[in-house]
Amino acid sequence: MTSAFRTYAKENGGRVSLLFLLFLLAIYSFITAGFSAFAIVCLLPAIAAAVLAAFHFRMFTFWALIVINYIISWKSMPATGIPTSIPNELLEIVLLTLAIIDVKEAKFERTANIMLYALMIWCGFCLLQVLNDTCGIGVDVGAWYTTARSLAFQLMYAFLVFTLYITNPKLLIRYLFIWGALSLFAVFWVWKQKNFGLTPSENAWLQGRGRTTHILAGGTLIRYFSIFSDAANFGIGIASTAVAFLVFAITSKIKKHRIFFLITGLACAWAMFPSGTRTAIACLMVGIMAFVFLSKSVKIAVPVTILFGLFIFMLAFTTIGNGNQSIRRMRSAFDKNDASANQRSINQEAMKKYLAEAPWGIGMGVGYKNVPANNKYTFMATVPPDSEYVFIWIHTGVIGISVFLICTAIMILGACWIVLFRIKSPSLRGIGAGFCCAMISQQLGGYGNQVLMQFPNCLVFYGGLTIVYILPYIENEWIEYEKEQLAKQEEKKRLKLEKKRASRV
């Protein structure tokens, strides 16, 4: 291969050099100016090579999706000039296309479950929203699709991709370790931001768009956001991640897994404090309470309840740690007279009056950019929604938010049913419980902040809930995998003990 390339380069040196320079120029254009038409044309060979590689290395494409989804909002990444959702969507479509091409190997029969049916109802409703012209400004299919993709279609993509590509215990454990490693990097980065400062691009965002919400107390308190889009997204996402990994650690039988899960869970629980996101505390509380219910074990439920109860008591009724601004801010979550919460209530009362005449909402894709100032629903198009539920309520009305809540309840209750009654292995049940509790935690976050459909949370937590529906199919393989790992663990323990005894002789 190398000799053939050298021969071609020798005979066509000028062309090779020109093509190489054009390729380098395209890369430079991509990094500095985004996707210009020229850069796209020059990068076509690289795109073609990437597509061919995807056919041969499908799981690599899946892992690439997981990693890119997690870091796509990182403000230190080079600007590409394309919408944030495009890389995710393209990779998901490629993965689904590959599964359809190799239909005999794909596990399409596993997709037929209650989560799929609930998502079909929600996606079908959002599809009908293209006809919604409550504001009387005409139908904009492009604007509708942008919102529908965020609120509905990406959920279906996540469900299908995780169902088709997490097919055995080894892939499941690999996913947990990759997710944990990405979470630990996010924890490290927030620690770095807090102790060593922000990068120039992060500081530019903080001093610009993020100034009013992320610099508080006269400039003495900064809400850190790590590699996420903002502090609320990070705080709630990392709190829900903490719930999942703490549950994994409590229920895992394999020592090396348990240690990694525990470190990740504790690190994520710490990381929610620098975010200054008060809802994160409630998310952690609700997630742990859900685990107490799903654990089906008094031995687990009692100590977890006591330890967590002491933690909440310390925050709500003592002044321990008040010297730290982040802890003081978290404590304000227990303040019923909080000004921010009161302002949200005032805004929502005003919204009710408008939406009483708009049961289908103001329409998907409708916002301050396309609603005239004299329009009846200008207030609804410009008021900050503050939470994902309120955003859905505004754009799809009481009918839409009702459909969303019913579908969400069906998906979560179906997953909890599987954990409680269909899975026999305690450790596999623990993995299912961890994903369920994380999703419940995340839904509470969506009630308090607009984070539910943001990167990386949507793929992580809806993908995690999807995994719960896969667990009954892989339980027998899991039991064999766990036996094998425990046997290796016992063998290492035996050899270590023998070596210790031999050293005493």
Image (cartoon, grey):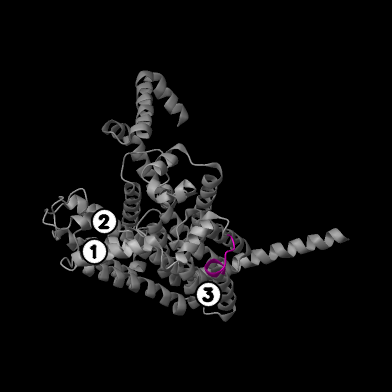
Q: Secondary structure at mark 2?
A: loop
Alpha carbon separation for disc pair 3 and 1: 48 Å
Quadrant for residue 125, please give it: bottom left
Q: Secondary structure at mark 3?
A: loop
- Residue 425's tag is 3
Label 3 or label 1, whichever comes before in sequence order: 1
- Residue 383's tag is 2
Alpha carbon separation for disc pair 3 and 2: 49 Å
Q: Residue at x 30, y 70 (%)?
A: 405
Magenta-span inclusion, residue 275: no
Q: Which residues are magenta?
A: 314-321
Q: Secondary structure at mark 1?
A: helix
The front one of 145 and 203 is 203
Question: Depth-wise, is mark 3 or mark 1 nearer the camera?
Answer: 1
The front one of 414 and 498 is 414
The front one of 446 and 418 is 446
Q: Residue at x 46, y 51 (%)?
A: 217
Amino acid type of the residue that numbered disc 2 sits on in the rendered structure: Val
Q: Position of residue 10 (x, y in %)?
A: 41, 19
Q: Residue at x 30, y 73 (%)?
A: 406
Alpha carbon separation for disc pair 1 and 2: 9 Å
Q: Is residue 64 left or right of residue 97?
A: right
Q: Residue under label 1, please give it.
A: 351
Q: Are marks 1 and 2 in contact (CB under 8 Å)?
A: yes
Q: Position of residue 43 (x, y in %)?
A: 33, 34
Image quadrant in which the C terminus is located: bottom right
Look at the image and tell me whether residue 61 can be seen: no
Label 3 or label 2, whichever comes before in sequence order: 2
Amino acid type of the residue that numbered disc 1 sits on in the rendered structure: Met
Q: Is residue 23 left or right of residue 128?
A: right
